[in-house]
Amino acid sequence: MKKIVALLLSACFVAAACVGIVGCDPAEEKNMYDGLNETAAMYAERAVQLNESVREKYWLDVTLFMYHYYPNMDASDGDLSTAYCWPYTETVAANWRIATLSDTLNEYVADYYRDTVEGFEYYRGFRTDYTTYCSSRATTVGMAGGDFYYDDNVWVSREFLNAYEELGDEDYLEKSVAVAEFVYSGWANDSLGGIYWCEQDKNSRNTCSNAPASLLFARLYEATGEEVWLERAKQVYQWTYDTLRDPSDNVYWDNISNSGSITTWKFTYNTGSMIAAGVKLYEITQESSYLDQAKASAAGAYSYWFKEREGYDYRVIDSVNPWFNVLLFDAWVELYEYDPEGTLPYIEAYEANLNHAYSMLHDGLMPSDWVNGWSKDENGTPVISKANVLDMAANAENFGTLAYFYQYVKE
């Protein structure tokens, strides 16, 4: 019953959201999912619904501005709710994922997608040495100043590359390459090695600035044909594998300090990034070690974050960051082609957790805690407080990735 209600709500929301969008007519919307199989269409519809909710609640089109929180806060609240660069990149990524699902959905989301990509320029640093993007947004294009994080710039470069592949603008590829050069400039030329986390605070070399950089560099090799990117991809991958992998379960630790002390926190996105990098390097080089390592980390991640719990007929995820999670999920989807039997149980458990979270949809948004849902008031009514755009946009991407899996990947 919950599933039926959720689907009805989804259909109503998308039809309502469609009104007022330039070039979108409710009659045309009925054909938006043509060409997708039934399961893919259901998940694509949810992705569009959640993405439009983010657009409605967080996005100011005139100034290409994204709020960080919903409900939106302002300076009078003592909390100016401006999205930082990292969360902003995910609002672009959600559009990208929808654009990959079909030509119709690409066309549907294209204008909003291009606007969010253009909005990156408010984060571009005021400097002449590198094309790089700041953690904080400026009020004027190209005038951002402050801290520059290498991992933030991996995500920016990735989104320019994605936009190049989906929208076909060569300028996006040029920007992706330019930003990736900044990322690689963070490589520490000392005995420890690795890419630092932050340019202004070079105290640690983190999995989040290395693992996704390896994947980015490998993809740039495919896009440009330049061998230097493949060399860098291998170098960064091997460093991360040798330095930050927990050999007991093949799940990745968070970072290593300059003194060699390891912070042993583990997050889904770090391991997911290394799985995806391993799969990509296997595809390029055909070296089986990369695929074997990806399989080992995929199994390790499933055991580490998905647990049996009383009252559930699937393994429950022990991670409450949808953006962290989507990078693990995407990696499993990439791995599926090479290990369908081993990977399918991971994906099915992930799908069950997502669907459970969707049953708790409130005010057009899905909770970031997929197991426990929203906080509730004394009457049991869900309360949305400081719902950050990173989580909400990632929820849209998660369903888009499920749609992609069922349409293009699953046998």
Image: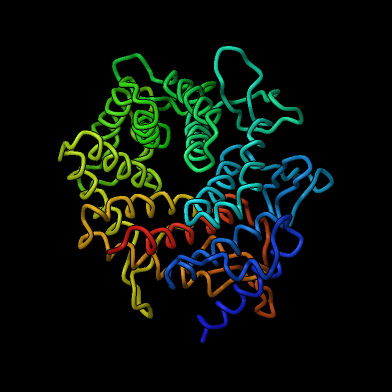
Side of 353 relative to 144 (left or right): left
Q: Position of residue 210 (x, y in %)?
A: 38, 32
Q: Position of residue 271 (x, y in %)?
A: 33, 45
Quarter assignment of residue 88: top right
**The C terminus: image quadrant:** bottom left
Quarter assignment of residue 184: top left
Q: Position of residue 98 (x, y in %)?
A: 52, 54
Side of 18 relative to 149 (left or right): right
Side of 295 relative to 10 (left or right): left
Q: Residue at x 32, y 28 (%)?
A: 233
Q: Residue at x 16, y 36 (%)?
A: 287
Q: Position of residue 264 (x, y in %)?
A: 34, 41
Looking at the image, residue 64 lies above or below residue 71: above
Q: Residue at x 61, y 52 (%)?
A: 109
Return the residue nearer the eye: 263 or 205: 205
Residue found at the very far right of the displayed protein? 76
Residue found at the very far bottom of the displayed protein? 1
Looking at the image, residue 47 lies above or below residue 376: above
Residue found at the very far left of the displayed protein? 288
Looking at the image, residue 321 lies above or below residue 43: above
Q: Residue at x 36, y 36 (%)?
A: 215
What colouring does the structure picture have?
rainbow
Side of 237 relative to 86 (left or right): left
